[in-house]
Image (cartoon, rainbow, N blue to C red):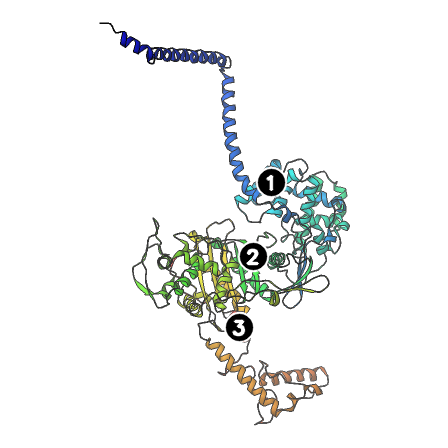
Amino acid sequence: MSDWFFKERRDQLINWMGIDSWIDSSLASTWQGLQERYNAASSFFARFRLSGWKRVANELGSEALTLGAGGFVLMYALALPAFLEIDENKALNTGKYAVKFLDRNGREIGQRGILHNDAISLEDIPDHMIKATLATEDRRFFEHFGIDPLGTGRALLENARAGETVQGGSSITQQVAKNLFLSSERSLQRKVKELFLSFWLESRFSKREILKLYFDRAYMGGGAFGVEAAAQFYFGKSIKSVTLAESAVLAGLFKAPTKYAPHIDLPAARARANEVLTNMVEAGYMTAGQVHSARLNPANPIETRTASSPDWFLDWAFEEIQRVAEGRGHYVLTARTTIDLNLQQAAEQALTSTIRQHGRNQNARSGALVSMEPDGAVRALVGGTDYGESQFNRATHARRQPGSSFKLYVYANAVERGLTPKSIVRDVSVGCGNWSPKNYDGGGGGGGSMPAGIAFAKSLNTVAVDLSLKYDRDRVLEMTRRLGVEGVKKTCSMALGDTGITPLQHTAAYSTFANDGILTKPYAILDITNSRGELIYTRDRDEPPAPRVLSRRVVEQMNQMMHQVVMEGTGRRAQLDFTYTAGKTGTSSSYRDAWFVGFTGQYVTGVWIGNDDYRPMNNVTGGTIPTLAWHSYMSVAHTNMDIPPIPGLAVHPAQIAERQRLEEQKRLQVIAQRDNPIYTSPAAGTQQRRSNSLMSDQTREALKRVAQAMRTAAGLPGETAPAAPQQGSPPGQGGPPAAGRRADGTSGGAGTLSSATVTSGATAGTSPIGDRR
């Protein structure tokens, strides 16, 4: 049969056979082409095939490129934080504000800022001052590019040979980077930032400009920044006029301004100046004969300071000035501050002596102390143990973990939502995710029940974490922000104080409870006047009234629990025998931070103890060294018994007795003024007897008889003795017999009780219970 029909149909359809043949041929040709190209490429690269030492070199080069690329990425990651620190306008602004600071009584206490007419060009600085600085600090300054590997290596070798730090490894550029952009905190992160910022400075400024910045910004001791201020402070002259011997003294201050300051240790300053002169000879800048006269005639500094400069406080006050005076159009200012110099000196002494006495054996090297009145007026602020060694203000800028002192915010939130000091809580570890808290003894809680006040006093971690979860951690964060604390993060362990807080912020938050729930914002400036004496700012006029942020019920109940901490909990060493106290201890993990923040009705004081490099201390808790420093300071801070009561607490019996004594004294004075004219007419020339003398009449009469006998023995005319008071005379004639005696008959005046507490030492207490105390 003919298939003409199907043949015709196939001719009209797709030629599948042709397509299949085309695909096969295309794949074959493509594969053949790839093989040819591969063979051609192999033949081409075969020309570069290496063997022997050439291959080894090639492999090393390839690995170097790979590691270099990775290193570049790592360097960029390390350099980025450093470049974020750059605020050129702020760091290089040398004359925006010039401020003279006064204390609360109007006495000058220091200056900050650089005056416009005090700018000294590099050409005006004597050649021997420049050579002395380069010979001592950075001999290869004009040769390196920011860092000096040779100088650093030489310094490491000399330090290893001497067994101590005798030479610094930082170049002048590195020191400028630290002065302009970084703090003096000792950490690896800061050194890495310093390295990259040095490269940036070298690319941004000339060597002469960097050297000028160094001469203007380096701290030289005595509150003086820059060589011009130092020359004025130590020698009473401009840097333009200093001699070679004086230049040697100034150049020796860069390394350790407090240690070698001539007004503190003149022999050490002169010995250091001799080292500088020797360095100048070794560097080839001068000959031995040229420096011989300076050795024979050392510099004689002048005495310009009558009291210790409160440098920590002034640094913070200058920051406050820049905030308050911004936009007012005045730059030469005089500011009256809140500082009390007596309290400042007492605070510095309490902190440094306590660390020196108790911290050395327990690896506690640094600390900070802030003391303010309940309304926020800062009376004393100590940012470290040695301002000359490190100007980093730990009181205002160090963010350290508060440990259990953070429980204040947790309990305050719980009390606001219904908890009371008598509410029953359980010592049970409640899990948060895969984490669960443990107490100081390492256990997860004994499961016992107790009042919330006892749990707070014993600083039980299990209870604090349970309360933070039960009453909502978001509300705890809101409580911290309400009290002025920023930066706290929401974590499972937030109740145990795992986020850094500055001592100034933390102390101000506690102060709100001493201020009856009125928000406390710490302040340093009372008023500011411009160069014409015009008042441009006063706190009473220009600041809005502080709002109430806590109810009186919350404040009173929290104060009662904080008082319980001092009476029977972890803060027993904070007891004062003349007034009631309240506060809370805190210790961070691994004993890296120890705190005590507490208050009376008059002062709120926070103390932090730790190490700048975050090294753990040897079992230092908040109830030990911080509480001892707090007690040492607060014992002398209260100079009279006129102390307001803490909200929610009764008046201390000693204060009641003192008030009764003063009332009795006033009553006797009224009687004396009524019955004895000598008290009513002092303006007429009669001598008024002091009714508040602490000396008894018998002692006074005995001293008069001794004086009369000594006059007689010396052949001098005797004084006319006053008529002795007649028996039965009203009190006050011949000296009121009750003056200087308390209502209970014991001797002592308003200051006697406080004086006794100065030497009483810390009240002994048992070992605190609860972790992060």
Between circles 2 and 3, the one closer to the viewer is 2
Distance from label 2 to label 1 (Cα)? 30 Å
Disc 3 marks which amino acid?
A: Ser
Question: Considering depth in this image, is 742 or 50 the residue closer to the camera?
Answer: 50
Identify residue for label 1: 155
**Label 2 with label 1: CB-CB less than 8 Å:** no
Q: Earlier in the sequence, mark 2 or mark 3?
A: 2
Question: Considering depth in this image, is 298 or 391 the residue closer to the camera?
Answer: 391
Any mark on residue 383, and which?
A: 2
* Rendered view: 59 above or below 614: above
Question: Considering depth in this image, is 354 or 483 the residue closer to the camera?
Answer: 483
Quick one: label 2, few (<14), some, or many (20+) residues within 10 Å?
many
Residue 387, percent from left and from top: 60, 55
SS class of the residue under badge 3?
helix
Q: Earlier in the sequence, mark 2 or mark 1?
A: 1
Between circles 2 and 1, the one closer to the viewer is 2
Distance from label 2 to label 3 (Cα)? 27 Å
* Rendered view: 164 above or below 577: above
Q: Quadrant of the N terminus?
A: top left
Disc 2 marks which amino acid?
A: Gly
Q: Quadrant of the C terminus?
A: bottom left
Identify residue for label 3: 754
Quick one: label 3, few (<14), some, or many (20+) residues within 10 Å?
many
* Rendered view: 727 above or below 91: below
Between circles 1 and 3, the one closer to the viewer is 3
Furthest-top residue in view?
1
